[in-house]
Amino acid sequence: EVQLVESGGGLVPAGGSLRLSCAASGFTFNEHAIAWFRLAPGKEHEAVSCIWSSNGRTHHEDSVRGRFTISVDNAKNTVWLQMNNLKPEDTAVYYCAVAESSSWCGPRRTFWFRYSYWGQGTQVTVSS
């Protein structure tokens, strides 16, 4: 059974940092794309960052580029999202998700409906 378990969310003041982790079990990262999405009240799923498990190639959306960094440890089947200089508009539930193909990670290609496996989400709240 494939499972993704996120952790690391919390409440931080604006300008603060958090590090989210996503531990996968039931399969091994191979040619997958692993992404972080977020969902805020009244909004649709928004792609944040993604990474190719095969070569570590990354993509960050404009809203987080320069502040967030995604990384992967294939040996540990774990992905991290380092979030710095957090802003109140970053407040959302953050989800880790996996797609069968790395082609679904990149500019204008990180579609939430292309990702087959999802974690339960972790709440990130940034106070102003």
Image: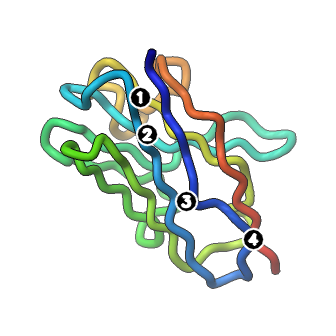
Eyeballing the image, is 1 above or below 48? above
Element at badge 3?
loop
Q: Nearer the viewer, residue 39 or 22?
A: 22
Which residue in the structure is indicated by mark 1? Answer: 98
Q: Residue at x 37, y 56 (%)?
A: 70
CB contact under 8 Å: marks 4 and 1: no
- Counting from the top left corner in percent of width and height, residue 15 is at 63, 84
Q: Earlier in the sequence, mark 1 or mark 3?
A: 3
Gap between marks 1 and 3 measured at Cα: 21 Å
The residue type indicated by label 2 comes to: Ala
Which residue in the structure is indicated by mark 3? Answer: 63
- Counting from the top left corner in percent of width and height, residue 104 is at 35, 27
Quadrant housing the C terminus: bottom right
Gap between marks 4 and 2 measured at Cα: 22 Å
Nearer the observer, disc 4 or disc 2?
4
- Counting from the top left corner in percent of width and height, residue 79 is at 37, 49
Which residue in the structure is indicated by mark 4? Answer: 11
Gap between marks 4 and 1 measured at Cα: 26 Å
Which residue in the structure is indicated by mark 2? Answer: 35
CB contact under 8 Å: marks 2 and 3: no
Gap between marks 2 and 1 measured at Cα: 6 Å
CB contact under 8 Å: marks 2 and 1: yes
- Counting from the top left corner in percent of width and height, residue 19 is at 50, 66
Quadrant housing the N terminus: top left
Q: Residue at x 41, y 71 (%)?
A: 66
Nearer the observer, disc 3 or disc 4?
4
Work out which residue is located at the far left of the displayed protein and give it: 55
Q: Residue at x 76, y 64 (%)?
A: 125
The residue type indicated by label 3 comes to: Ser
Q: Nearer the viewer, residue 54 or 60?
A: 54
